[in-house]
Amino acid sequence: MKNSKYRRRFGKTLIQIYKFLFFLLLVAMVVGSWLEMQGLYLIDGKTTIVLTVIHALCLGTLLLTYHALDIGKKRPLDLVIGQLLSVIISDAASLLSASLVLKTLPHMGIAGVTLLCQGILCVLWSVSATWLYNAWVPAKKVAVLYSDERAYESMGELHLDKKRYRVVKTVDLTDTEKDCDGIVSELPEVEGVFLCGLPTKLRNDLMSLFIKKNVTVYIRPKISDIFLNTAQRRYMFHIPMMSYESENHSVIVRASKRLLDILVSLPLAVIALPFMLIAAIAIKIEDGGPVLYKQDRLTRGGKVFRIMKFRSMRVDAEKDGVARLASESDDRITKVGKFIRATRIDELPQLLNILKGDMSLVGPRPERPEIAEQYEKELPEFHLRLRVKAGLTGYAQIHGKYNTTPYDKLQMDLIYINDMSVLTDIKLLFQTMQTVFQKESTEGVKNGQTTASKNDGEEKK
């Protein structure tokens, strides 16, 4: 196992150097374009340096925001998408900066060639870096310890990620009578361990033992863990304490968030207007039905509001009166509906809901009252999502899927609620752009289910 650790350490160091060289090359291409423009616009050296620094800071921030250098954690295609978005936005920012300095538009031909070369570099680097990672960083040997079947099932993708992890053993601790030392002693030499759904005391004791053995510990968090993660550290009565306030959003945070909603959604609505008109015409031509679909949804404090979306299903999609989510291969979705759902165009009318104040740009996605009621029967804490306004996008939409379970959605929403700020919103808005290109984020629930609950459908059989 020592050879494996040394090989992984060397491989990761190699990848870090490769990342740095890639970043330098992207920046160097822009520097080259500014030097090329010097003869056309007489840009002085100081201006070139300032423009280069602005571009480098913008590019670096965006690459981190999109996790576009996470080799081994993402597919090459996802890396390329994140890198291209980073390059396009940072190049646009550089051109805007240059136009303000030069008081004229820079040479678009040079800028276009530079962007093309950067795009080619992104593709070549992502493919070669992934190959390098797979060749030099061996899969980590891990074990999975669980006592909750559903928590274990949620880790199903772990077994498919064979390039990063090799599951050598799974242990069901539901009815075990062994102590922690006995459990650890029966495991083979592992480099990592996943703890899923274990009782708090057992989990903490095992975690301490594995940390002593220098084994990486991965924990499937509980809702209480999320609250503790954002609790404030205090020193009271001469001892360390932690405190958590249920209402921790100041008036300033809420006001600045509302200001961001208006400043972003208003110009977005203007830019999106042509696409909205085309979508409206296409929906009307296809079946002659109404263009917009209005539905009751829940927002902050359980307030009901009417959400607006472009209609993507048949007019009689719920003629039986049963509220249900879209399922895999759902025949209720129209031809136009498939396209506008895949491209998120169906969500654009919600910009009006945001301007009206019913929703925010970022927040938990609003659920239908009937479906929320079903979720709360299985998960009473589900109402905790209603502590803030519903949003157009959020953690669950960026890191999850349409069919993500209510428990997982709640966890991601609570992570956002406990970390809510304008800077967080801006970061998530940029990350949302990337999800448009990820088909899996729109996967429907399984056929026969009406909600995303794992238990839904089983009871009907």
Image (spheres, helix red, strand yellow):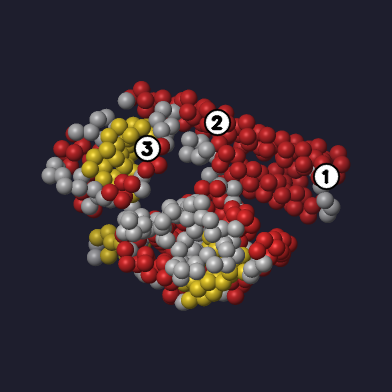
Q: Secondary structure at mark 3?
A: helix
Q: Quadrant of the N terminus?
A: top left
Instruction: Identify the amino acid type marked 3.
Output: His
The residue that label 3 is drawn on is 159
Residue indicated by mark 2? 129
Q: CA distance from mark 2 to mark 3?
A: 23 Å
Horizontally, is 389 left or right of 372 in the view?
Answer: right
Q: Quadrant location of residue 445?
A: bottom left
- Left or right, 202 with reference to 14: left
Of label 3 and label 1, which has the lower sequence position?
A: 1
Residue sticking out furthest to the left: 177
Asked if one can make out residue 395 in the rendered structure from this viewpoint, the answer is: no
Crowding at dot 1, Cα within 10 Å, few <14 / some 14-19 / many 20+, comes out as: some
Q: Which mark is residue 3?
A: none
Percent x, y of residue 271: 71, 62
Q: Is the C-beta separation of discs 3 and 1 under 8 Å?
A: no
Foreground residue among 196 and 103: 196
The residue at 33%/52% (across/down) is 221
Disc 1 or disc 2, which is closer to the eye?
A: 2
Location of mark 1 (residue): 107
149 to the left or right of 164: left
Sequence-wise, which precedes: disc 2 or disc 3?
Answer: 2
For the residue pair 169 and 458, the one nearer the viewer reads as 458
Q: Residue at x 63, y 46 (%)?
A: 86
- Type of residue at label 2? Ala
Please tell me whether mark 2 or mark 3 is closer to you in this view: 3
| SS at circle 1 | loop
Is 11 rendered above or below residue 263?
A: above
Q: Position of residue 234 (x, y in %)?
A: 32, 62
